[in-house]
Amino acid sequence: MIRTGQSNPRCGFCAVMAGAVVITMASWGVAAADDAPVSQAQAASPAAETCPKPILANPTWVLIPQVQQMDLIYPQRAKRLDQTDSVVVSCTVASNGALRNCRLVSDANPGFDFDKATLKVAPFYKTQPLSSNPAYAKLPVCARNAGPPTVMIKMDWTIEYGH
């Protein structure tokens, strides 16, 4: 059973399957901590001061993986050891809404391959095409002209037993 927008208001996708895996995915408009520093020329430019990076905040998801797919991707060693994790990735959003070039931003429980699992899952998600995406339309024109937007995705991986 899939429930969207559970108790967490930032939850863009929450998947629950009784007795199996619970994966919560949220997206928001926060720049990655390791973003490149701003050069002096960029800092002096008025456009750099007023134009934010093109980051989609709370996009509308039109395609999500099935819970059974997510269960298959859950790292087996982590499942055996009842390990959970919270992983954040940043992805570029293509004009058709597909996620591309995802990269790891943070992993709260490294060593159990949740980072790899999250990177495997990310391409299964798709937002509305940018031409009809309300989150993209809210970006200033200068940000929309700055190149493809990114989306930050947080996935909380847990196992839920017997409901």
Image: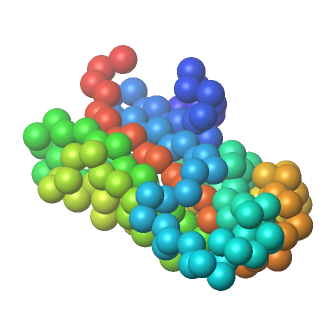
Q: Residue visible at 67% across and 60% down?
A: 55
The answer to whether 26 appears left or right of 144 in the picture is left
Instruction: Name the residue at the bottom extreme.
Output: 41
Q: Residue at x 39, y 35 (%)?
A: 22
The residue positioned farthest toward the top in the image shown: 163
Which residue sits at x=61%, y=46%?
28
Viewer-side residue, 41 vs 62: 41
Q: Nearer the viewer, residue 84 or 31?
A: 31
Relative to 117, is 57 above or below?
Answer: above
Q: Quadrant of the C terminus?
A: top left
Q: Position of residue 113 (x, y in %)?
A: 23, 58
Residue 62 can be seen in this image: yes
Query: Residue 108 lies in what quarter of the image?
Result: top left
| Residue 48 sits above or below residue 81 on the image | below
User: Residue 81 lies in what quarter of the image?
Assistant: top left
Q: Is residue 126 left or right of residue 104?
A: right
Q: Report how many numbered discs are placed on residues in the image.
A: 0
From this view, report whether residue 11 is shown above or below residue 106. Answer: above
Asked whether residue 121 appears in the rendered view, the answer is no
Q: Position of residue 36 (x, y in %)?
A: 49, 73
Q: Please state which of residues 160 and 84 is positioned toward the viewer in this rendering.
A: 84
Residue 54 location (% of width, % of height): 71, 65
Corner quadrant of residue 91: bottom right
Q: x and y percent of residue 162 in the render?
A: 30, 20
The residue located at (57%, 78%) in the rendering is 39
